[in-house]
Image (cartoon, grey):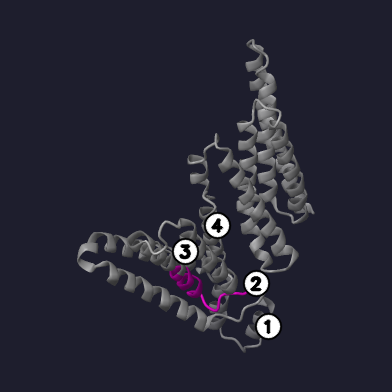
Amino acid sequence: MDQWYSKLHSEGLLSDASREKIRLHETTGLFSVHWELKTLLYIGVLLLTAGLGILVYKNIDTIGHQFVLLFIALVVLGSFTYCFKYALPYNRQKVKAPNTAFDYVLLLGAISLLTFMAYLQFQYKVFGTTYGLATFIPMVVLFCTAYYFDHLGILSMAIANLALWMGVSVTPKELLNNFDFNSEHIIYTYLLLGILLLLLAYASLKFNLKAHFKFSYQHYGMHVAFIALLAGYFHFYSSIFALIWILGLAGLAIIFYADAYRSRSFYFLLLVILYSYIALSSLVIRAVTQIANIGGLYLALLYFLGSGTGLVVLLINLNRKLKSA
């Protein structure tokens, strides 16, 4: 391209000033602010919803509950009216947003809808003591919204509501803080949730129904399933049933190691390796602790030094292998 402009300049068809402007334009180029704008819009939605919540909280006595509900309902109605008006036709494949603001208006509508239903339940007990129904209805609405408008953020909200409906949480902090490792019921519930999410990930790809949703389902599913299997192992630590949980974890690791390698996903490969390393380390430490003298401590230290180094080398080699493939 530069040669073409030079030729035009040498033939006198391009002035010195124009040639210099073109040169400056080519050297500086354009700077994209795409992600900066998206981040600002996302922060704007969060600040708006948080600000409205604080405003309502501080002035609820003067504003009145009915006015608050009406206002939230208008926000929900306005947001979804805008989205239905400008949304592209539904498709089983990935559908791009018609404009930059669309995703954030939809997110505002979904958050406001959850706030509206939670407010109704908290203030007026519209679902009575049937708390399962109070979480089931928003979950269904969120899943339908995520699929119809093709929104990954709302899909994550729907998955979180699925976990709430089942009586657990898939948020990593809550998962680790509130997990009752002595409750078989919670362990089995987590395991069921993890398997369900992994099946949804498989179905998304198998039936080509929003195949790009597979990542979100598999992301949450693998974390929940692996943690549940580890919790089951530690819960039945002194029983022969502990072996069943470890074998289940090994089987899951083999399946998703092959899947991660096939899909060239280093992230899922990393999850498999890390959770497998935790399981293997627990078995090694269990064997080492059988040595009652000081030698057991030294063996444990040597294991972590050697295995930690080997783990880093393994991950580096796997990353190179994926890139070369």
**Left or right, residue 202 beside residue 59:** right
What residue did someone put label 1 on? 7
Amino acid type, callout 2: Lys
Task: Choose mark 2 or mark 3, whichever is in front.
Answer: 2
In the image shown, does 306 or 92 lie closer to the viewer?
A: 92
Task: Check the image and name the residue furthest to the left.
Answer: 62
Task: Tell me the crowding category of disc 3: few under 14, some 14 to 19, or many 20 or more residues within 10 angstroms, Cα based.
Answer: few
Magenta stretch: includes residue 301: no
- Residue 138 in view: yes
**Left or right, residue 186 beside residue 281:** left
Q: Is residue 237 above or below residue 274?
A: above
In the image shown, does 297 or 125 lie closer to the viewer?
A: 125
Task: Report, in whole angstroms, how far the alpha carbon at label 3 lies from the one at label 4.
Answer: 27 Å
Nearer-N-terminus badge (2/3): 3
Q: Is residue 246 above or below residue 167?
A: above
Task: Tell me the crowding category of disc 2: few under 14, some 14 to 19, or many 20 or more residues within 10 angstroms, Cα based.
Answer: some
Determine contact: label 3, label 1, CB under 8 Å: no
Residue 106, x across and y down, in percent: 48, 72
Residue 211, x across and y down, in percent: 69, 66
Task: Tell me the crowding category of disc 1: few under 14, some 14 to 19, or many 20 or more residues within 10 angstroms, Cα based.
Answer: few
Nearer-N-terminus badge (3/4): 3
Task: Report, in whole angstroms, how far the alpha carbon at label 1 lies from the one at label 2.
Answer: 45 Å
- Residue 320 in view: no
What residue did someone put label 2 on? 94
Q: Secondary structure at mark 4?
A: helix
Task: Choose mark 3 or mark 1, whichever is in front.
Answer: 3
- Please report the bounds of the magenta region as a residue range: 94-109
Amino acid type, callout 1: Lys
Quadrant of the snapshot with the N terminus: bottom right
Nearer-N-terminus badge (1/4): 1
